[in-house]
Image (cartoon, rainbow, N blue to C red):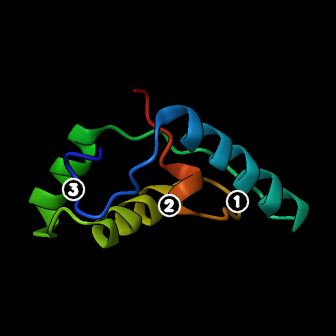
């Protein structure tokens, strides 16, 4: 994703996992419901092609919101929480 999205956070995978775990704990402590949204680079590229969005962090956040809205119930959507990607 770092190569695909302009201004995507540049953290090592292990560091990213630690940051996400902390962010999830913080949201849960604030009584948010957190649901991870699995995404792929191909899905995001298709989203950009379909919507005409540039491949930047703003478009990625919008993509996550759109995909997260399709989940049932209240969802605290955070780019960092929902950007769970395999290496």
Is residue 65 placed above or below 83 in the rendered structure?
below
Query: Mark 1 near mark 3, Cβ–Cβ under 8 Å?
Result: no
Q: Earlier in the sequence, mark 1 or mark 2?
A: 1
Question: Which residue was labeled with disc 2?
Answer: 79
Position in image of residue 59 (x %, y %)? 28, 68
Residue at 18% over, 62% down: 55
CA separation, marks 1 and 2? 18 Å
Where is the N terminus found, in terms of image quarters? top left
CA separation, marks 2 and 3? 16 Å
Question: Which residue was labeled with disc 1?
Answer: 73
- Looking at this view, is 80 or 53 the one in front? 80
Question: Which residue was labeled with disc 3?
Answer: 47
Please state which of the two labelled residues, at mark 2 or mark 3, is closer to the viewer.
2
Residue at 34% over, 58% down: 8
* Number of other residues with Cα within 10 Å of mark 2, as a class: few under 14, some 14 to 19, many 20 or more: some
Is residue 53 placed above or below 35 in the rendered structure?
below
Residue 72 found in image quarter? bottom right
Where is the C terminus found, in terms of image quarters? top left
- Looking at this view, is 76 or 2 the one in front? 2
């Amino acid at each position: 994703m770092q190569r695909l999205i302009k201004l995507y956070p540049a953290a090592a995978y292990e560091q990213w996992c630690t940051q996400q775990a902390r962010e999830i704990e913080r949201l849960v402590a604030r009584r948010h419901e957190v649901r991870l949204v699995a995404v792929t680079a191909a899905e995001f590229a298709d989203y950009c092609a379909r919507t005409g969005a540039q491949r930047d962090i703003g478009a990625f956040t919008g993509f996550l919101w759109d995909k997260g809205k399709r989940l049932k119930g209240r969802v605290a959507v955070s780019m960092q929480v929902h950007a769970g990607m395999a290496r």
